[in-house]
Image (cartoon, grey):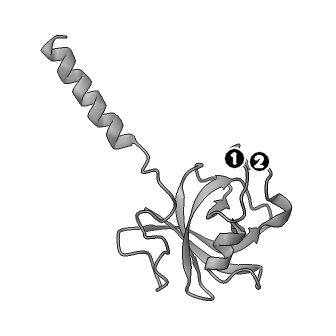
Amino acid sequence: MTPTRLAALAVLAVALVGCASRGGPPGEDWGADAPSGGGPAAHEAREIGRGNASWYGEPHHGRRTANGEVFDMNELTAAHKTLPFGTRVRVENLATGQAVVVRINDRGPFAPGRVIDLSRAAAERIGLIRAGVAPVVLYTD
């Protein structure tokens, strides 16, 4: 292989690594449990939305999500109308101050005024189970 081709291949490899997904479980960069204080986590995060969050569980457990996965209500996942599948989002419940990091794997919610549907496990983490719907702020990095 010529030095020019080798250099081009090296540049391409570096570019592809820079575009790679961070992968890993939700919360890897923000910690297993997102900070429960107000505002984004310590590293730079940007607000991407505000509105009401709701949750879904038992009736959907074991069914396919929009990205083809089997829905597990015990995982930290969520449905969003437009965010790419795999996007990790920090969801802060404005009523309780609690937060959780979820991975987008489904589409929804379809009720007016709602910005995200959380799995039961994620809803439990931010105190949303009893209320059913609560105002939230969404952050991503």
- Residue at screen point 76% across, 85% down: 131
Q: Identify which amino acid the numbered label 1 is placed on.
A: Glu
Kind of residue indicated by mark 2: Arg
**Point 77% across, 67% down: residue:** 56
Q: Residue furthest bottom?
A: 96
Structural crowding at the residue carrying mark 1, measured as other residues with C-alpha within 10 Å and reported as few (<14), some (14–19) or many (≥20): few
| Rendered image quadrant of residue 58 | bottom right
* Label at residue 69: 1
* Left or right, residue 126 beside residue 18: right
Q: Earlier in the sequence, mark 1 or mark 2?
A: 2
Q: Is the Cβ of the residue at disc 1 closer than 8 Å to that at disc 2?
A: yes
Residue denoted by label 2: 64
Residue 10: quarter of image: top left
Please state, as top left, top right, bottom left or bottom right, where the N terminus lies in the image.
top left
On the picture, is 105 further left or further right than 38?
Answer: right
**Which structural element holds mark 1?**
loop
Spatial separation of the CA atoms under disc 1 and disc 2: 5 Å
Above or below 96: residue 10: above
> Residue 139: x, y in percent?
50, 68
7 to 70, vertically: above or below: above
Q: Residue furthest top?
A: 1
Query: Dot 2 lies on which element?
Result: loop
Q: Residues within 10 Å of mark 2 (few under 14, many from 20)?
A: some
Quarter the C terminus occupies: bottom left
Which residue is most to the left? 3
**Residue name at image x 69 percent, y 53 percent:** 106
Left or right position of 22 against 6:
right
Q: Which of the two residues, 30 or 94, is positioned nearer the viewer here? A: 30
